[in-house]
């Protein structure tokens, strides 16, 4: 019986890496540069739309929506440029199945997007930190302004530092034609401030404290006890309304921050998809347009 020898044919492995880092770096640099140009252009257009005059220029809502739309457009356009450059510049792979070529092209586009995102994040890290810091300061100013929204004359910087000063001043305004009592005025104001702040923090001012405040106001302003009681109730109502406005402003800022974060994530994910698709399209065009060179042995290389 004759013996039949069998041999195993192995798959040849190319010594070259499947990752074309040169093309990836080129695509990432292009995407980062396009992002920088579009961000600067958007900043210029945004500043042109803002006017210091009341009633002129774009509103705050319009400006915010336009900024979000411009950021999304910037991300998508830059990703498309970077992915396309990556696909066109990568080396041609031979003896590969079409599905493998498609996967490598999309992977190259995705890697270029990742690298460009890191570059942009590194370049704009200080700028983003400044924006966040400015936003926090603006939020603090908004809350302080909301705390004084029920007042019409509290516009001085001292009132911004301590919004309760205005309400205490309102409590101890003397009656028309009477001189204010200066006896222990500072102690009275301090005590009244503690009573009001403690009551607002707990959510309710006890009736005994209201009565005591009314007596303090009546003794130092020269108005009748009934008028003092009405004044105390009115000032407390104003402060409670200001407190609610501050809560609404904080809640609106929280929702705006959450919406912005979600839109940013969505824009980045779509940008990654666009970069991958653009790289796959450009890679196919590169393979189709590249001339075929026939060697002496009859092999075909790109």
Image (spheres, rainbow, N blue to C red):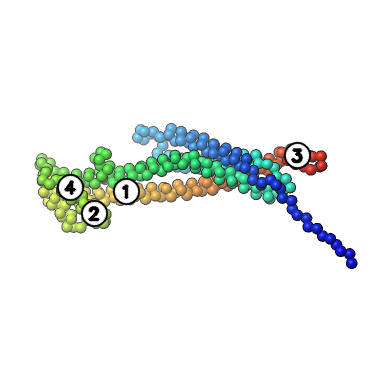
Residue under label 1, please give it.
246
What x and y, as percent, mark residue 257? 42, 48
The residue under the point 22% across, 56% down is 205
Residue under label 2, please give it.
198
Whether the residues at callouts 2 and 1 have beta carbons within 8 Å, the answer is no
Residue under label 4, please give it.
189
How far apart are the alpha carbons under marks 2 and 4?
A: 14 Å
How far apart are the alpha carbons under marks 3 and 4?
A: 91 Å
Give left or right: position of 157 versus 138.
left
In primary-sequence order, the first of circles 1 and 4 is 4
The residue under the point 52% across, 41% down is 119
Residue under label 3, please give it.
292
In primary-sequence order, the first of circles 2 and 1 is 2
Label 4 neighbour load within 10 Å: few <14, some 14-19, many 20+: some
In the rendered image, the quadrant that contains the C terminus is: top right
In primary-sequence order, the first of circles 3 and 4 is 4
Element under disc 4? helix
Q: Is residue 139 visible?
A: yes
Q: How many marks?
A: 4
Is 33 situated above or below 262?
A: above
């Amino acid at each position: 019986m004759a013996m039949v020898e069998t041999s195993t044919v192995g798959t040849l492995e190319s010594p070259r890496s499947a990752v074309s880092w040169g093309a990836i770096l080129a695509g990432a640099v292009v995407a980062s540069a396009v992002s920088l140009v579009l961000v600067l252009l958007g900043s210029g257009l945004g500043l042109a739309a803002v006017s210091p005059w009341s009633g002129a220029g774009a509103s705050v809502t319009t400006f915010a929506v336009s900024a979000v739309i411009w950021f999304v457009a910037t991300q998508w356009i830059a990703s498309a440029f970077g992915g396309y450059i990556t696909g066109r510049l990568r080396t041609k792979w031979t003896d590969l199945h079409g599905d493998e070529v498609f996967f490598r092209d999309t992977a190259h586009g995705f890697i270029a997007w990742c690298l460009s995102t890191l570059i942009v994040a590194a370049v704009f890290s200080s700028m983003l930190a400044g924006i966040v810091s400015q936003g926090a300061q603006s939020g603090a100013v908004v809350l302080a302004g909301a705390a004084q929204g029920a007042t019409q004359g509290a516009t001085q910087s001292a009132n911004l530092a301590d919004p309760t000063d205005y309400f205490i001043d309102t409590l101890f305004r003397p009656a028309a034609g009477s001189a204010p009592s200066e006896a222990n005025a500072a102690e009275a104001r301090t005590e009244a401030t503690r009573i009001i702040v403690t009551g607002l923090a707990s959510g309710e001012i006890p009736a005994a404290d209201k009565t005591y405040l009314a007596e303090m106001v009546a003794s130092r302003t020269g108005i009748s006890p009934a008028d003092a009681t009405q004044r105390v109730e009115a000032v407390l109502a104003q402060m409670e309304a200001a407190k609610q406005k501050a809560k609404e402003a904080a809640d609106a800022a929280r929702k705006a921050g959450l919406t912005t974060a979600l839109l940013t994530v969505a824009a980045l994910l779509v940008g990654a998809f666009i970069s991958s698709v653009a790289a796959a399209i450009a890679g196919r065009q590169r393979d189709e347009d590249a001339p075929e060179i026939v060697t002496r042995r009859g092999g075909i290389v790109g």
